[in-house]
Image (tube, grey):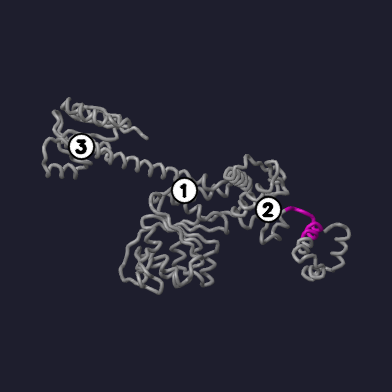
């Protein structure tokens, strides 16, 4: 528990001793007696946590000391102790920023004790909140949340920094699994909105008939099943950030309503006529090309330009080079720590295999592959045979390495035989080649 430093500013030596003795019964209190106002102000650099201040000091009035203390540190709690019970004076001092006003009587010691106890609880709570915010800030530092050192990623970091400095709308694009939500969170928690809500809406996961209610809320009885009033996501995100994931999946009718909310900064809950003002920073994400969707008539052009803001395009993992190994080592270390498996390394052939794969599932796929390899490996080392790819686009892996035309032919035929359960006639038909070619290659051990 943090020691609380208390300045007791009191010109009556005997009264000061009584307060000092009483407060010192708590070993966490460091009590410093100060005889006048000027000395108190001169010693503010020592960093008191609380000040008890006699209102009638010989050199400076208690009100003047209070003003000077508040100029030095507006958050420093000051408890005024006075020999006169004047309600108007007490009210004025509380308006000026005093934490409490206590008159000198037989209950003074206990009232000071309770007042300081309440202040201390608030100090501890503020510290917990401050520590939590610092932890969140560290957790979402750009180079902490997104691992890698490639030039492609450095360009993303640069744009994220620019986005975090303003309230500009951000549109994040990239393939599935590239980390669009992580980027949105990093921008939020490094911006001026970091102490306000971050609210996520996955547009593709909400049925069309419910999305308006989800986004803007509804009143009790607005529709069948609306048993009580519900606050929408935009209201939840007031003064903070709303992240609209997979915005490209939103239907045209809802797009029109969203555009109005963004333009007017106000909404109306379903089943209500009351207009509610909302101010929120908007970040959107999609794996689709929204401009192409506009041309197809699937996305409103005016909404497209409203949401474009600062565009951030996340590179697919296959274009990030050595970041693959940086991520792989991070994932294996994290997984091993969580499961108390000890240190697990990745041998060179396994690393080479990881670098050659195209990762259609991007970072999400790499994590799954590495965690499985960590389970399957022996002797605390992941080997090439421990790494298994189960991509739904396995053919895309065939052409990753340079090879002769004959070798490519062999790979393609082998892949098709595996896909069609060694049905040679069917494979010959699919590839438009003679079945004798396949029989010959199998006879020669090429397949």
**Distance of mark 3 from mark 1, alpha carbons?**
41 Å
**Majority secondary structure of the magenta segment?**
helix
Mark 3 vs mark 1, foreground winner is: 3
**Distance of mark 2 from mark 3, alpha carbons?**
68 Å
- Magenta segment boundaries in residue numbering: 401-411
Closer to us: 215 or 11: 11
Q: Residue at x 82, y 70 (%)?
A: 425
Label 2 belongs to which residue?
A: 357
* Residue 41, visible in the rendered structure: no
- Secondary structure of the residue carrying numbered label 2: loop
| Residue 80, position as x, y percentages in the image | 19, 37
**Distance of mark 1 from mark 2, alpha carbons?**
31 Å
| Residue 132, position as x, y percentages in the image | 41, 44
| Residue 400, position as x, y percentages in the image | 71, 54
Q: Quadrant location of the C terminus? A: bottom right
Label 3 belongs to which residue?
A: 66
Q: Residue at x 39, y 70 (%)?
A: 226
Closer to us: 237 or 336: 336
Mark 2 vs mark 3, foreground winner is: 3
The numbered dot on residue 161 is 1
Q: Which is nearer the N-term, disc 1 or disc 2?
A: 1
Magenta stretch: includes residue 402: yes
Q: In this view, does 390 lie to the left or right of 436?
A: left
Q: Which is nearer the N-term, disc 3 or disc 1?
A: 3
Closer to us: 447 or 433: 447
């Amino acid at each position: 528990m943090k020691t609380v430093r208390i300045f007791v500013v009191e010109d009556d030596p005997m009264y000061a001793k009584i307060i000092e003795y009483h407060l010192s019964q708590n070993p966490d209190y460091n009590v410093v007696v100060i005889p006048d106002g000027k000395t108190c102000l001169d010693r503010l650099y020592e960093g008191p946590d609380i000040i008890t201040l006699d209102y009638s000091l010989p050199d400076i009035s208690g009100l003047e000391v209070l003003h000077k203390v508040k100029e030095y540190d507006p958050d420093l709690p000051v408890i005024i102790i006075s020999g006169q019970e004047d309600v108007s004076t007490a009210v004025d001092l509380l308006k000026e920023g005093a934490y409490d006003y206590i008159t000198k009587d037989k209950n003074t010691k206990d009232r000071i004790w309770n007042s300081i106890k309440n202040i201390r609880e608030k100090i501890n709570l503020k510290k917990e909140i401050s520590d939590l915010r610092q932890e969140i800030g560290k957790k979402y530092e750009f180079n902490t949340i997104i691992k890698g050192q490639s030039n492609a990623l450095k360009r993303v970091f640069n744009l994220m920094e620019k986005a975090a400095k303003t309230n500009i709308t951000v549109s994040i694009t990239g393939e599935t699994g590239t980390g669009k939500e992580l980027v949105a969170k990093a921008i939020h928690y490094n911006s001026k909105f970091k102490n306000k809500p971050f609210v996520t809406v996955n547009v593709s996961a909400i049925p069309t008939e419910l999305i308006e209610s989800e986004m803007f809320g509804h009143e009790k009885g607005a529709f069948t099943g609306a048993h009580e009033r519900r606050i929408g996501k935009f209201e939840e995100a007031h003064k903070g950030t709303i992240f609209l994931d997979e915005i490209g999946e939103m239907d045209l009718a809802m797009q029109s309503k969203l555009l109005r909310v963004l333009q007017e900064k106000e909404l109306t809950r379903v089943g209500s006529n009351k207009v509610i003002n909302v101010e929120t920073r908007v970040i959107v994400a999609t794996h689709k090309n929204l401009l192409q969707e506009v041309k197809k008539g699937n996305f409103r052009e005016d909404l497209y330009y409203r949401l474009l803001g600062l565009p951030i395009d996340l590179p697919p993992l296959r274009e990030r080079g050595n970041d693959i190994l940086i991520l792989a080592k991070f994932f294996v270390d994290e997984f091993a720590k969580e499961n108390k498996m000890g240190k697990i390394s990745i041998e060179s052939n396994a690393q080479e295999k990881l670098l050659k794969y195209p990762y259609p599932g991007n970072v999400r796929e790499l994590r799954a592959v590495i965690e499985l390899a960590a389970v399957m490996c022996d002797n605390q080392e992941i080997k090439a045979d421990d790494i298994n790819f189960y991509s739904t686009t396995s053919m895309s892996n065939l052409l990753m390495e340079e090879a002769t035309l004959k070798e490519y032919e062999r790979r393609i035929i082998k892949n098709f035989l595996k896909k069609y359960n060694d049905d040679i006639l069917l494979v010959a038909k699919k590839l438009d080649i003679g079945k004798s070619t396949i029989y010959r290659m199998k006879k020669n051990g090429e397949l």
